[in-house]
Image: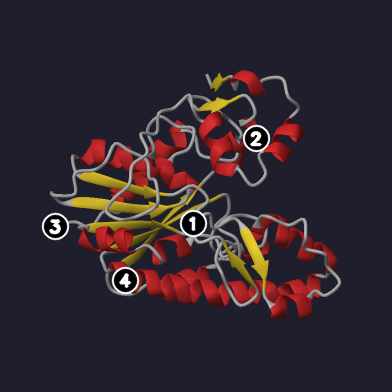
């Protein structure tokens, strides 16, 4: 059974009104909508990022989990990093950041230092859309936020008005709808930027590192790489990251199971978001797969 939490004075307002009122105030809306779960948000070192708590004791050996909304575990009482810790007895550090991409971790010295100190790092495979590149800039922390286009993008899509675009998903759908052939150039640029950023992240945090693939498609399914997260990432891109000490754990998320919300806790207006994220059963599955692939010895 799912549990929904009312939004107090906002209850009864049409969802389209809320979306307009909270545009640009996404963090505030998220905090209101998620108030049914106490995420016990915390910071580490001098980082400005708030992660899911309680704070981990990093004075003893620990596994660091870096990722986005799925790793954070939005709408679920116990996300897979917590489950891995409970089932193995090893301290786990949840560095999942909602809507975060590879840029948010590459630019945070405190997070990089913590990841380097870990016995093992588990890095969720990010999509290629939420990072700054030679076509557009994203917000340094909310990597799904579109900040501004580059001159190159303006020239390439001079016929597209971007004044109403605030998120990378909206940006890419608008560019694709305008011209599929030109959009291929955008996707190629994003892949190149992603490869370089992921290489840099692995170099900075060290090994052993597990790259965690969470998706409704397989890495080999190139036909859906432009529509299913992690966007634009392919098997060849993952293979290029592998080296001694870097492995890949693949978890296929059943789309039908994602539509189920049993055991999830969310606000009245969050059912759409909840149906696109793993529920408790899938977090258990992810934890089991990670545990099975932990280095031995």
Q: Are marks 1 and 3 in contact (CB under 8 Å)?
A: no
Regarding residue 158, the answer to whether it shows in the image is: yes
Percent of width and height locating residue 120: 25, 58
Q: Quadrant of residue 250?
A: bottom left
Q: Nearer the viewer, mark 4 or mark 2?
A: 4
The tag earlier along the polypeptide, 4 or 3, is: 4
Residue identifier under label 4: 204
User: Which residue is nearer to you in this view: 110 or 275?
Assistant: 110
* Cα–Cα gap, marks 2 and 3: 43 Å
Regarding residue 236, the answer to whether it shows in the image is: no
Residue identifier under label 2: 272
Residue identifier under label 1: 141
Q: Are marks 2 and 3 in contact (CB under 8 Å)?
A: no
Q: Which of marks 4 and 1 is in front?
A: 1
The tag earlier along the polypeptide, 2 or 1, is: 1
Q: Is mark 4 on a helix, strand or loop?
A: helix
The tag earlier along the polypeptide, 2 or 3, is: 2
Reply above or below: 204 against 144.
Answer: below
Residue 236 located left or right of residue 151:
left
Residue identifier under label 3: 297
* Cα–Cα gap, marks 4 and 1: 18 Å
Q: How crowded is mark 4: few (under 14 residues within 10 Å), some or many (20 or more)?
A: some
């Amino acid at each position: 059974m799912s549990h929904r939490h009312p939004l107090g004075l906002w209850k009864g307002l049409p969802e389209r009104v809320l979306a307009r009122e909270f545009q640009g105030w996404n963090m505030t809306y998220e905090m209101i909508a998620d108030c049914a779960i106490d995420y016990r948000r915390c910071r580490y070192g001098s980082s400005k990022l708030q992660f899911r708590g309680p704070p981990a004791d990093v004075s003893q050996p620990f596994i660091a989990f870096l990722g986005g909304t799925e790793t954070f575990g939005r709408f679920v009482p116990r996300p897979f990093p917590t489950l891995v810790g409970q089932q193995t007895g090893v301290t786990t550090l949840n560095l999942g950041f909602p809507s975060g991409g590879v840029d948010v971790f590459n630019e945070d010295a405190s997070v990089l230092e913590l990841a380097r100190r870990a016995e093992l790092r588990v890095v969720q495979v990010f999509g290629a859309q939420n990072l700054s590149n030679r076509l557009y800039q994203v917000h340094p922390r909310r990597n799904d936020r579109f900040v501004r286009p580059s001159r190159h993008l303006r020239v390439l899509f001079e016929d597209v008005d971007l004044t109403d675009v605030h998120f990378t998903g909206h940006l890419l759908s608008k560019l694709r709808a305008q011209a599929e052939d030109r959009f291929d150039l955008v996707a190629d640029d994003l892949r190149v930027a992603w490869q370089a950023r992921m290489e840099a992240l692995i170099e900075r945090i060290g090994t052993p590192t597990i790259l965690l693939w969470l998706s409704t498609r397989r890495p080999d399914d190139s036909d859906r790489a432009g529509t299913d997260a992690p966007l634009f990432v392919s098997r060849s891109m993952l293979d290029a990251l592998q080296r001694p000490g870097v492995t890949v754990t693949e978890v296929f998320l059943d789309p039908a199971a994602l539509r189920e919300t049993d055991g999830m806790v969310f606000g009245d207006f969050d059912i759409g978001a909840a149906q696109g994220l793993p529920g408790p059963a899938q977090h258990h599955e992810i934890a089991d797969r990670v545990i099975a692939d932990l280095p031995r010895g």
